[in-house]
Structures are given as structure tokens and as C-alpha cells.
Amino acid sequence: DAGPGGAAPGHGGGAGATRAGGAQSLPEPMVRCAECGVHAPKGDAIVAGGETFCSAEHAQRHAARASDRDAR
């Protein structure tokens, strides 16, 4: 039940959401994927070889390209 506020309890708060204690939650920092340039939440990002990626697939693709360059 959404109730009078519109969003179901614990959902849809966005940047202005407040925690149970009344303190505002801060937005999660975003990081840029070294493979495609998309920004992803830092908590969801994959870190490999000192770089950040939006997915494990992009981390693997980036590593494969780097090893191809090293082989030449």
C-alpha cells in the first residue's frame, strides 16, 4: 500500500530520502567505467587492475584488449 505519501514505505525515496533516525542519506558516489565510459554507483562497480568498470564483462574485455596490445 502506497499510503498518502505516494511511495511504498522504504521505496522511491531518491536523493531527499530520510533514514529512520531523520538524517538525510547521501547519494552514492558514481565512478566511470574505463571500458565504455558509463557512470555506475561505486558500490556496484568492479575494480580490476586499478581501474573501475560497470560490469565484470567490461573488466574482462578491457583486460583482453590490454593483453593483446602487450603481445604485439
Image (cartoon, rainbow, N blue to C red):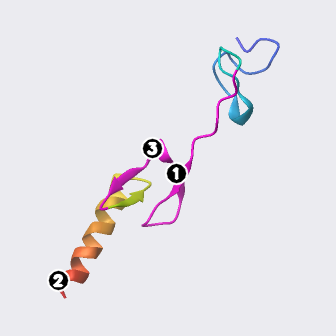
Say which amino acid is labelled 2: Ala
In the rendered structure, find residue 44 and report the number of the disc placed on it.
Answer: 3
Q: Which tag, 1 or 2, sits closer to the chain's start?
A: 1
Per the rendered image, the range of residues in magenta is 23-49
Q: To which quarter of the image does residue 25 belong?
A: top right
Q: How many marks?
A: 3
Task: Give the SS element for disc 3.
Answer: helix
Q: Say which residue appears at 57% left-offset and 47% top-offset.
A: 29
Q: Is residue 70 left or right of residue 53?
A: left
Residue at numbered disc 1:
40
Q: Is residue 43 magenta?
A: yes
* Residue 53, image x, y percentages: 41, 57
Q: Say which residue appears at 25% left-offset and 82% top-offset.
A: 69
* Residue 30, image x, y percentages: 56, 51
Q: Is residue 43 left or right of residue 62?
A: right
Task: Give the SS element for disc 2.
Answer: helix
Q: Quadrant of the C terminus?
A: bottom left
Q: To which quarter of the image does residue 48 belong?
A: bottom left
Q: To which quarter of the image does residue 17 belong?
A: top right
Compared to residue 24, the image places residue 42 above or below, namely: below
* Residue 26, image x, y percentages: 64, 36
Q: Residues within 10 Å of mark 2 (few under 14, many from 20)?
A: few
Task: Give the SS element for disc 1.
Answer: strand
In the rendered structure, find residue 71 and report the number of the disc placed on it.
Answer: 2
Q: Say which residue appears at 63% left-offset and 19% top-offset.
A: 10
